[in-house]
Amino acid sequence: MSPAKGTGTERDNVSKRLFTVGPVEVMEDVRQVMARPMITHRCKEYRQLHEGIVEKMRKVLDTDMDILLVGGSASVFLEACIRNGVSRKNLGASNGSFGNRWQEISALNGKDVKKIQVPWGEPIRAQDLDGQVGSDIEAVTVVSNESSTGVLNPLPEIVDSVRSQGDALLFVDAVTSATAVDLELRRLDLDAVVFGSQKALSLPPGLAFLACSERLLEKAKTVQNRGFYTDILELKKKNDENYALTTPPVSLMYGLDYQLDRIMAEGTAARYRRHEEMAKLLEDWAAKRDGIYPLEGFRSRTIAVINKGSMPYDQFSAGLKAKGFEVSNGYGKIKDSTFRVGCMGDLTVKDIKDLIQAMDTTLEELK
Ligand SMILES: Cc1ncc(COP(=O)(O)O)c(C=O)c1O
């Protein structure tokens, strides 16, 4: 799909670029594509769009898993994993707010949750899970990139530990890593990978994705009360006909189709490298000041969680906004001591260098 000729003005009355943790910056050409005329979701054109998206997403993620999509934020599929994959009990491994969130979702859905808590800023390691996944555990939930702490958890060793202990399903929240980091889906053979449109895909919020395994679909057949919107068996049935279960956000799907082409044109290897480079620049910047929060060796490539030290953050953030740059405050229990810079999606190394210059100037001004 090539961009439609549109009348969109540069950035309308929005004057800041987003270096946030999601929603993130959406490029002008993507916004124009999304302004195309509407089609209904029961027509031939829709089926072609849907089919193309699923095929391209499989290529981008390098997987043969089923790709399900619904209108909603990523949380709808975090909940669906629990409602379809757990009858009684699961294990929730956490090292931050979003790991805790998934534990909470299990509990709110009436499941018994065995909680593993790893200190914030540290990764979840194999030894944290060894001996913990008994035969009563139907699934293990883990966050790939913990957006509150900026820790990129080492999925391969987590997967090895869980698989060596039995048949528990493995669910991964890849909300802030999918399409920015190589998730090695072919090798890791996960059961669920959840993400949304507003992060590394550089689209507006509103589309949620689930890559799911045959094992999860089989398990779902045995689980009661899967709900309506969250029933992956119904979603899969429709998906196989290139239809959506309910009215899909077609405009967003135009944008997604376009972004998947953009990702394939860049190449995933180059894209992963670009994210690493952007994250490294921010890490080096932080190292010259109060440092970066997560442990070395396990740092996110999409979100830099930077220590504030004695910086007057509100003034710093206002100074950046005045220059046209928006960053995010800290999250959860480290909200007051850290701030977060998103470096994902369509942002470039040059964009990050520009931001760094603006951060330096702003800090100088605050002296
Ligand atoms: C790691 C992680 N998981 C889950 C979520 C929740 O995603 P959503 O708001 O799309 O439901 C977020 C949102 O920032 C996140 O960063």
Image (cartoon, rainbow, N blue to C red):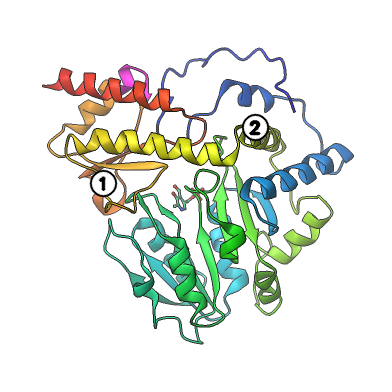
Residue 332's place in the image compared with 125, above or below, is above
Left of 284 or right of it: where is 257? right
Q: Quadrant of residue 144?
A: bottom left
- Which corner quadrant holds the N terminus? top right
Q: Quadrant of residue 21?
A: top left
Residue on which the image places disc 2:
265
Q: Secondary structure at mark 1?
A: loop
Q: What residue lies at 21% left-to-right and 26% top-to-bottom?
A: 315
Left of 352 or right of it: where is 291? left
Residue on which the image places disc 1:
335
Magenta part of the chain: 320-325
Q: What residue lies at 68% left-to-right and 59% top-to-bottom?
A: 65
Please provide percent x and percent y for residue 352.
Answer: 38, 27
Neighbours of disc 2 within 10 Å: few (<14), some (14-19), many (20+): few
Q: What residue lies at 36% left-to-right and 57% top-to-bottom?
A: 97
The numbered mark, 1 or 2, whose residue comes first in the sequence reads: 2
Pick the front one: 63 or 28: 63
- Which corner quadrant holds the C terminus? top left
User: Is residue 247 in view?
Assistant: no
Residue 35's place in the image compared with 42, above or below, is above
Please provide percent x and percent y for residue 93.
Answer: 40, 68
Name which residue type carries label 2.
Ala
Left of 72 or right of it: where is 288? left
Residue 321's place in the image compared with 151, above or below, is above
Name which residue type carries label 1.
Lys
Q: Secondary structure at mark 2?
A: helix
Please provide percent x and percent y for residue 274.
Answer: 47, 35
Q: What label does residue 59 carry, if any?
A: none
Q: What residue lies at 39% left-to-right and 34% top-to-bottom?
A: 278
